[in-house]
Amino acid sequence: MKKAFVFLATGFEEVEATGTIDVLRRGEVETTVVSITGDCKVTGAHGLQLVADKLFEETDFTDADALILPGGMPGSSNLNAYAPLKDLLVKHYDQGKVVAAICAAPLVLGGLGLLKGRRATCYPSFEPQLIGATITGEAAVIDGNVVTGKGPGLVFDFALALVKVLNGKPIAEEVAAGLLL
């Protein structure tokens, strides 16, 4: 079974985190929610609290197939300020494994140079931070081992793109049908 890790920082976008986690689990992806805050209880941008499965510093990522960043503010800025996560993303990307971000969170990938020469999307006001990317404006974009999503109202497009990359189009279509999409 493919394994994905979804990272939470204070101020994450709740719809993007919960929607992505839900769709991945429906799509037969073992999904672990990881807090970078030092506390498993993490508060989102709109006051919703989620309890992560693990703390970053206690998690082994060696068998990860995908590393996923929900957006939101200040969540995306908090992810971007966490050096251990950025180091992990670069290592994972260099191994050809999937890195993904939605809404404002692609700014992390852009700042690391992981979007250079790639097609990508994000929340419109963050486009300048996708350094070197060709901005598509699409709901979700798959370009090699990088998946990006535009924003909260398009979380299903993003999450289904991840299921497609990790477990194939038939499973993604099955999940979409079950969700009446």
Image (cartoon, helix red, strand yellow):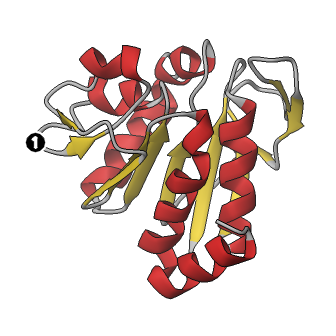
Q: Nearer the viewer, residue 62 or 30?
A: 30
Dividing the picture into quarters, in which one does residue 41 lie? top right
Q: Who's the residue at 55% across and 76% down the image?
A: 172
Which amino acid type corresponds to the residue marked 1 in the rendered image? Gly
Circle 1 packing at 10 Å, graded few (<14), some (14-19), many (20+), is few
Residue 156 appears in the picture as rendered: yes
Q: Nearer the viewer, residue 171 or 57?
A: 171
Q: Is residue 66 above or below residue 71?
A: below
Tag 1 secondary structure: loop
- Tell me residue 1's x, y (percent): 61, 82
Could you tell whether 62 is left or right of 7 in the image?
left
Quarter of the picture holding the C terminus: bottom right
Q: Which residue is mark 1?
A: 117
Q: Who's the residue at 28% across and 62% down the image?
A: 96
Residue furthest toward the left?
117
Could you tell whether 118 is left or right of 159 in the image?
left
- Tell me residue 79's x, y (percent): 54, 24
Q: Is residue 37 above or below residue 58?
A: above
Residue 28 appears in the picture as rendered: no
- Tell me residue 128's x, y (percent): 25, 16
Q: Who's the residue at 89% across and 28% down the image?
A: 49
